[in-house]
Amino acid sequence: MPGPWLVKTQEYLLERWWMRLRRDHVVLPNGVELEEYHVLEMPDWVCIICPVKSHVGEPAIVLVRQFRHAVDRVSLELPAGAIEPDESVLDAAQRELVEETGYRAENFVPMGKLYADPSRITNAGHIVVAQGAVQVEDPKPDPSEELEVVVVPIRELDGLIASGELAHATHVAAILKATSDGLISVD
């Protein structure tokens, strides 16, 4: 049965306000010893599934398009962002939704959390569905964000995922989970 690793030493190699990189010296339950196992500590974050009606009245979802430097491409994604210290998941969802899209919602339904890379990164992405959302103001993204708000018919999501235009793994998983749970549908 898999079990926890014994941590012999930990050393922080880089510490910033939004991330810390550490090197662990670990011993696995089977006796294998790894002198350098790197772990990235980052804050949890939230992604928001925001179902709305399109301009022609069909079921749609609010997405954002932005450039992602690490992969050197424009990415179509759910509105999302880091959870601030001492902020709840639902408060972060409400804040991020308004900041990135200008939408406010009546109700936020937590759907759980996903880990993008639990072997190397400590944070989780929390999934929240924003119900009863309407656009009430212009987006006010952070200075480091250039966003385009895109309302996409739900019937187009499978194609966007298949084509790789919507390729953020955690966001795709969140959409698939919301669909299988019946929280978003083409009806």
Image (cartoon, rainbow, N blue to C red):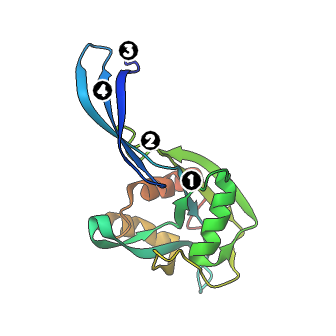
Give the alpha-carbon distance from disc 1 to disc 2, as whole Å. Answer: 16 Å
Residue annotated with mark 2: 122
- The reply, left or right, for residue 7 in relation to residue 174 is left
Query: Do the residues bearing badges 4 and 2 touch, measured as CB atoms within 8 Å?
Result: no
Give the alpha-carbon distance from disc 3 to disc 1, as whole Å. Answer: 30 Å
Q: Nearer the viewer, mark 3 or mark 2?
A: 2
Q: Is residue 80 visible from the viewing direction of this image? A: yes
Is 48 located above or below residue 31 in the figure?
A: below
Residue annotated with mark 4: 25
Residue annotated with mark 3: 1
Q: Residue at x 44, y 41 (%)?
A: 122
Q: Is residue 164 visible from the viewing direction of this image? A: no
Residue annotated with mark 1: 127
- At label 3, which amino acid type do we have? Met
Q: Nearer the viewer, residue 159 or 92?
A: 92
Q: Secondary structure at mark 1?
A: strand
What number of labels is visible? 4
Q: Earlier in the sequence, mark 4 or mark 2?
A: 4
Q: Earlier in the sequence, mark 4 or mark 3?
A: 3
